[in-house]
Image (cartoon, grey):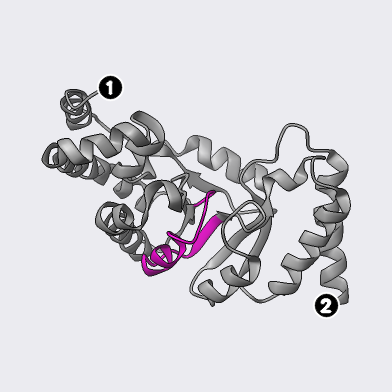
Amino acid sequence: MKNAEDLRVVRYLFSHRTIAPHYEDFERVDRLWNGWGMACAVAPCCVCPLQRLLTRWAGLPLTVELLADAREEMEETFACLEEADDPIFQILCSSPARLIIFPENLSGEVTGRNLLRRYAIPYWQRRVEQLHRAGKLVALHNDGTLRASLPLLLDAGLDAVESVTPAPVGDMTVEEIRTATARKAVVWGGLPGALFSPLYSEDFFVAHIRHVLDVFPPGSGFILASADQVPPDATLSRIRLVREIAEEKTATG
């Protein structure tokens, strides 16, 4: 998107879109897991309209400019996109997937508390309630800062917040995240992707894993995982360390 005129194009495209289910690829992946994990439905269609503009179509400067100068047309576009998503969520509700992840690429300091409250949270609440009625679990991909977003995400009724990135990369400590979530949602992440790089010492990496597992012991509603992508310069030995330390911690309590 380049300007406000493109909003008309977006509305036209999505008003004339047709949607049909296609479960074969999902079922193939689910068979490949063979009980070792839960296949989940992750698709850009699950991204709220505001985040689509911020992270995919317009970027931060243009999105803010349009909200300032063409707010009514922006809100008309958001409503159009939300209505166009209805058939997708009907398909998701009827799908074999037990877990749906909203791939929002959310970062609190980018979207901001006010925009989240006004445009994102109502969308997520509506969709979470719809998916819950269909017996689905729902997570959201928040791979940026958390201080402005995490409390609101918990109010949205999500079952899990995925790709949770603590300090030293994120803006909340592991302890602050544990206190904020307080069993309201599963915390999924804890290991900033950057720590897999040799730029951080292995001793620092190991100490961080142990600290996370101390703060989130077994039974605390926590899934240990990389928070966002493991970088290209990561070593396989460091990836193995995650499993080894987790197994050691489980064995020793």
Residue 251 in the image, given as x and y percentages of width and height: 87, 72
Check the picture and name the quadrant holding the N terminus: top left
Q: Which residue is mark 1?
A: 2
**Callout 2: helix, strand or loop?**
loop
Other-residue count near label 2 (Cα within 10 Å), few / some / many at <14 / 14–19 / ≥20: few
Upstream in sequence: badge 2 or badge 1: 1
Give the label, 2 or 1, closer to the camera.
Answer: 1
Q: Nearer the viewer, residue 154 or 116?
A: 116
Instruction: State left or right for residue 127 relative to residue 160.
Output: left
Instruction: Please report the residue visible at 35 percent of the width from the left and 60 percent of the height from the top.
Output: 128
- CA distance separating discs 2 and 1: 55 Å
Check the picture and name the quadrant holding the C terminus: bottom right
Instruction: Please report the residue visible at 70 percent of the width from the left and 41 percent of the height from the top.
Output: 230
Amino acid carrying mark 2 in the image: Gly
Residue 51 in the image, given as x and y percentages of width and height: 36, 42
Q: Nearer the viewer, residue 85 or 194?
A: 194
Instruction: State left or right for residue 190 relative to residue 58.
Output: right
Q: Is 158 placed above or below 14 here?
A: below
Res. 66 image quadrant:
top left
Magenta segment range?
A: 142-162
Amino acid carrying mark 1 in the image: Lys
Q: Is 4 placed above or below 192 here?
A: above
Q: Which residue is mark 2?
A: 253
Instruction: State left or right for residue 29 relative to residue 142.
Output: right
Res. 131 image quadrant:
bottom left
User: Total marks drawn?
Assistant: 2
**Callout 1: helix, strand or loop?**
loop
Is residue 230 visible to us here?
Answer: yes
Residue 162 in the image, given as x and y percentages of width and height: 55, 55
Task: Specify whether residue 158 is painted magenta.
Answer: yes
